[in-house]
């Protein structure tokens, strides 16, 4: 995602950004949009609870969180990028 899309996206994204006590995979400050790319480990009960708490914290900070599974990015890269683009433009609109 970083090398093939976000690194050269027209609105600046950064990798591994610390927000409060959390680290998000990718963050666009201008659009207040965080992107998380999740592997299978995110779907065990403890991880689900942690991710929900983190998402709630970020949303309370005015940050929208988009989550993608690794396999979805691999199988549907172009639509994933289009969804990110749509959300960035909507938040800036």
Image (cartoon, grey):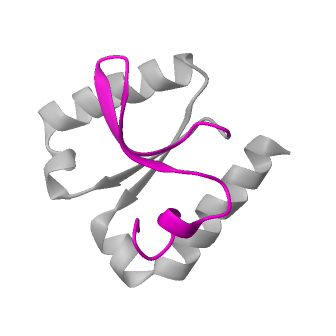
Q: Quadrant of the N terminus?
A: bottom left
Q: Quadrant of the C terminus?
A: top right
Q: Nearer the viewer, residue 59 or 8?
A: 8
> In this image, 10 relative to 13: left or right?
right
Counting from the top left corner in percent of width and height, residue 4 is at 44, 77
> In this image, 57 relative to 38: left or right?
right
What residue span does the magenta drawing correspond to?
1-30
Which residue is at the far right?
Answer: 93
Vertical order, 42 against 18 (above or below): below
Residue 19 in the magenta stretch? The answer is: yes
> In this image, 92 relative to 2: left or right?
right
Counting from the top left corner in percent of width and height, residue 91 is at 74, 42
Counting from the top left corner in percent of width and height, residue 20 is at 37, 17
The residue under the point 60% across, 60% down is 84
The residue under the point 40% across, 58% down is 68
> Image quarter for residue 48?
top left
Q: Nearer the viewer, residue 51 or 78?
A: 78
């Amino acid at each position: 995602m970083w090398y093939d899309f976000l690194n050269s996206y027209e609105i600046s994204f950064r990798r591994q950004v610390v927000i409060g006590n959390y680290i998000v995979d990718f963050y666009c400050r201008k659009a207040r949009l965080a992107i998380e790319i999740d592997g299978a480990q995110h779907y065990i009960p403890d991880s689900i609870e942690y991710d929900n708490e983190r998402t709630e914290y970020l949303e309370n900070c005015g940050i929208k969180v988009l989550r993608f599974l690794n396999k979805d990015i691999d199988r549907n890269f172009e639509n994933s990028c289009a969804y990110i683009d749509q959300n960035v433009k909507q938040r800036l609109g």
